[in-house]
Amino acid sequence: MPVTREDPLALESQLCFAIVTAARNVVSIYRPVLEPLGLTHPQYLVMLALWENAPRTLGDLAEELAFDPATASPLVKRLEAQGLVRRARRTDDERRLDIDLTEEGRELRERALAVPEQIMARVGMTHDEVVALREALRPFSGRVDRAE
């Protein structure tokens, strides 16, 4: 069978199309898994960042998540309304707002431990395959230090 070269300008040949389509679909894959936790996908990302390191400022949180602070702020407010986080002005610098986990927010982490396994099952991937895919996407994440 002769080898045919794919059309370099075919939509299906485009890496950008594959990544954008996958990004949209990721949210729909996570939605039913996160629903029982009472979290949306962006809220889940905020909680992941806080479970890793809390308290932290809104600016630090937004930077870590590659969110605009104007995007992160309403997410944090909704999480606060749910009783998962609390916002407080720093005593040493009242211009800075710290976001910390509540006890309920810390406890939610235990329930969230099942999320990665459920996602892997939904997409039919092993842990090693997920790690390999994540590493393959690293150059596109915008979080790579590049030597000029």
Image: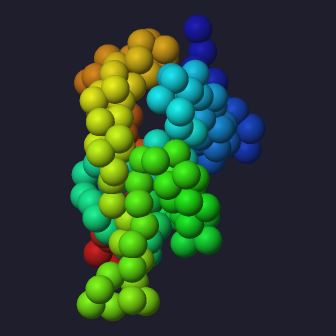
Residue toward you, 33 or 22: 33
Figure disc tally: 0
Q: Reply above or below: 63 against 40.
A: below
Residue toward you, 69 or 84: 84
Residue 42, given in percent of the width and then of the height, sits at 54, 47
Q: Reply above or below: 125 against 45.
A: above
- Judge left or right: residue 90 versus residue 118: left
Q: Is residue 138 visible?
A: no
Which residue occupies 33% across, 60% down?
Answer: 100
Which residue occupies 32% across, 68% down?
Answer: 56
Its colouring scheme is rainbow
Residue 103, given in percent of the width and then of the height, sits at 29, 45
Which residue occupies 49% across, 14% down?
Answer: 122
Residue toward you, 48 or 96: 96
Q: Is residue 80 visible?
A: yes
Work out which residue is located at the far top of the displayed protein and give it: 1
- Judge left or right: residue 6 versus residue 57: right
Which residue occupies 42% across, 47% down?
Answer: 84
Q: Quadrant of the C terminus?
A: bottom left
- Judge left or right: residue 27 versus residue 113: right
Residue 62, given in percent of the width and then of the height, sits at 46, 67
Work out which residue is located at the far right of the displayed protein and give it: 10
